[in-house]
Image (tube, rainbow, N blue to C red):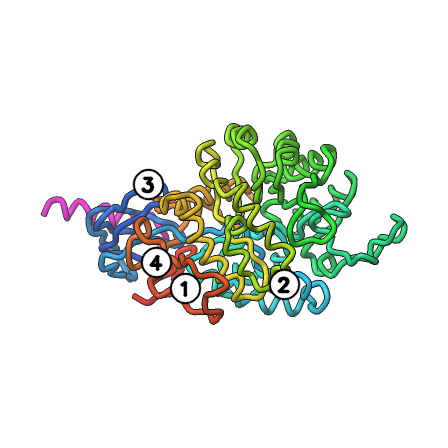
Amino acid sequence: MKKALKLSAVALSMTAAFSANAATTIFKNVDIFNGTEEKLYEDHHVMVVDNKIAQISSKEIKAEGDAVVIDGEGKTLMPGLIDGHAHVMINYNFGDIEHNKDITDISINSITVAERFLDDGFTTVRDMGGPAFGLMREIEAGNVKGPRIYPSGGFISQTSGHGDFRDRADAGFSTAQQGDISNFERMGIGNVADGVPEVLRATRLNLRNGASQIKIMAGGGGSSRFDPIDTTQYSVEETCAIVEAAKDWNTYVAAHTFNDRSVNRLLDCGVKTFEHGFFINDDTMKRISKEGGYVVPQMWGLSPDLAKNPLMPKEKLPMVAVLQEKYGDYGQRLLENDVKVVFASDYVGANSDAERARRYEIWWRTQAFGSNFEVLKQMTSTAGEMLAMSGPRGTAKGKLGVIEKDAIADILLVDGNPLEDMSIIGATDKWFDADPEYKKIDTIKLVMKDGKIYRNEM
Ligand SMILES: [Zn+2]
């Protein structure tokens, strides 16, 4: 009796500390996965006030006033998921965007992409290239349903680099003829910039528009036509100039990169996140770990199922097998070298392509890293830590990816224990063979973002 009294006094003083109009939600009877520990806290209670987690207790929480009380009925309460590398504005295949689409097509489609991210439990997405500023603003204003977006703006690429999507004749054979820009640049998906003055202008343009971090192309890639994957892109001077401009804005640089030469140059200049990185050796991994960097790989790039992609040209099929054979242990090696890894879906294409790839990616990562807990951290606490490097440029004003007092209230209620079964947050071994029609994941029962409930099937 005495105990109960003391508890309600605590609850009273807590609510009293917030404004009278504070929106309060109490989750009763939940098992908590907090994003950092490989266990569930059974039979707990969580109180959200406004957009923050105000109290977590093993004892019932009573609040004053008209709190919304949700009986969790033993379901798992966990942090909202974070995708560390996505392209919410690239919703068609690259060729289609380059030749057939304008900003209206891609913007309208992005609304569907955003909505499905949130319905799938993703409360934050770091956008790694594309004109996502307007979408971010409309989501923040409540006009579009979607995840919180950490936008990079147009990715910054050298001429001939991974972001140079001009057609063969556009670029010409003389620098004087290079005035033509690609549809990618016209729509703000990418920005081709060479030399220190141009890369500074491109970086500062993104920062001006509201980028939470800067994305550069520091190596070749699979989706662009004129930059072989072994190449290193951007000189030391250009790279360091970009990093300094980002640091001056109190944020950091993320780089598309694959090989040791590129990653070590990026580290020399102070780049913090390494997108993809498939070909790096153990020494480079150790250096990333030591210097506090993060690797953000889309592991499907090393999956044998990639060969089932109907758009994959036949001549590229042997390459899929070689990648799998040579780098199939990439995930394990990253863990052995103590590298912090963050989840990345990084799939562009029509809406349903991206969703199917994302759900497949969750499953494939459990295979590649050998642990549900590891993958869950990559999608919650580690990703939140990475996003915190945006400092004052971050879209969220608080801690993401964890269930703890004072963290931002991004919360899922799911039916089952994700530490044992990742299919409850959408993991599936089906990819190109999955049904292209979008269906909600029925084990995700509730999605709260920033203290507001967006999906509720409790
Ligand atoms: Zn990408």
Image depth: mark 3 or mark 1 in front:
3
Mark in the foreground, 2 or 1: 2
Name the secondary structure under disc 1. strand
Q: CA distance from mark 4 to mark 1?
A: 18 Å
Tell me the quarter of the image containing the C terminus: bottom left
Marks 2 and 3 sit apart, C-alpha to C-alpha, by 39 Å
Query: Residue 392 versus residue 436: which sits nearer the camera?
Result: 436
Assign a secondary structure to mark 3.
loop
Given contact means CB atoms under 8 Å apart, are the residues at marks 3 and 1 in contact? no
Name the mark on residue 424.
Answer: 4
Which residue lies under the disc numbered 1?
454
- Circle 1: residue type: Tyr
Q: Nearer the viewer, residue 397 or 20?
A: 397
On screen, 357 above or below 40?
Answer: below
The residues colored magenta run: 1-24
Give the residue type that dot 2 points to: Asn
Q: Secondary structure at mark 4?
A: helix
Q: Which residue is mark 2?
A: 93
Say whether residue 9 is magenta.
Answer: yes
Discs 2, 4 touching: Cβ within 8 Å:
no
Relative side of 112 to 176, left or right: left
What crowding class fits label 1: few (fewer than 14 Cα within 10 Å), some (14-19), or many (20 or more)?
some
